[in-house]
């Protein structure tokens, strides 16, 4: 998929989340180990932390992310993420 802003190639990945905690994006087929979940560890595996603390309004969204892991595409140059669900 091409980025609509810079026309560079976007990387396929998935959105992940933990209730009341963080939302993050990881490249598809990342060999990320979920035992230690820190910003540094997510970024070491090519991921991006999108949000640190969630408000109660987002609880329903977080449950959806944890169960479904929506496919998304990321342009790391423009810091843009598109999600398909």
Image (cartoon, rainbow, N blue to C red):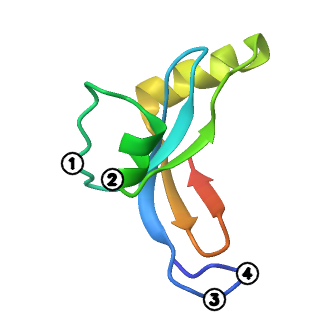
Label 4 close to label 3 by CB (< 8 Å):
yes
Query: Which mark is on residue 45?
Result: 2
Instruction: Point out residue 28 in the picture as x, y percentages from the top left corner.
Output: 33, 56
Residue for point 35% across, 53% down: 44
- Please name the residue that numbered disc 4 is placed on: 5
**Gap between marks 3 and 2 measured at Cα:** 24 Å
Instruction: Point out residue 2 in the picture as x, y percentages from the top left corner.
Output: 57, 82
Instruction: Point out residue 72 in the picture as x, y percentages from the top left corner.
Output: 51, 55
**Gap between marks 4 and 2 measured at Cα:** 25 Å
- Choose the circle earlier in sequence order: 3 or 1: 3
Instruction: Point out residue 30 in the picture as x, y percentages from the top left corner.
Output: 27, 52
Residue for point 25% across, 54% down: 29
- Choose the circle earlier in sequence order: 1 or 4: 4
Residue for point 45% across, 69% down: 11
Label 2 close to label 1 by CB (< 8 Å):
yes
Quadrant of residue 20 within the rendered picture: top right
Query: Against 83, is 55 above or below?
Result: above
The nearer-to-camera label among 3 and 1 is 1
**Gap between marks 2 and 1 measured at Cα:** 8 Å
- Please name the residue that numbered disc 3 is placed on: 7
- Please name the residue that numbered disc 1 is placed on: 31
Residue lying at the far bottom of the rendered structure: 7
Label 4 close to label 2 by CB (< 8 Å):
no
> Left or right: 57 with respect to 68?
right
Element carrying mark 4: loop
Label 3 close to label 2 by CB (< 8 Å):
no
The nearer-to-camera label among 1 and 4 is 1
């Amino acid at each position: 998929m091409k980025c609509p802003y810079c026309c560079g190639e976007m990387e396929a990945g998935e959105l992940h989340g933990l209730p009341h905690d963080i939302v993050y994006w990881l490249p598809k087929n990342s060999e990320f180990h979920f035992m230690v979940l820190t910003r540094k560890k997510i970024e070491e595996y090519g991921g991006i932390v999108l949000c640190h603390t969630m408000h109660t309004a987002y609880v329903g969204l977080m449950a959806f992310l944890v169960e479904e892991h929506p496919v998304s595409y990321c342009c790391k140059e423009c810091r843009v993420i598109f999600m398909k669900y």
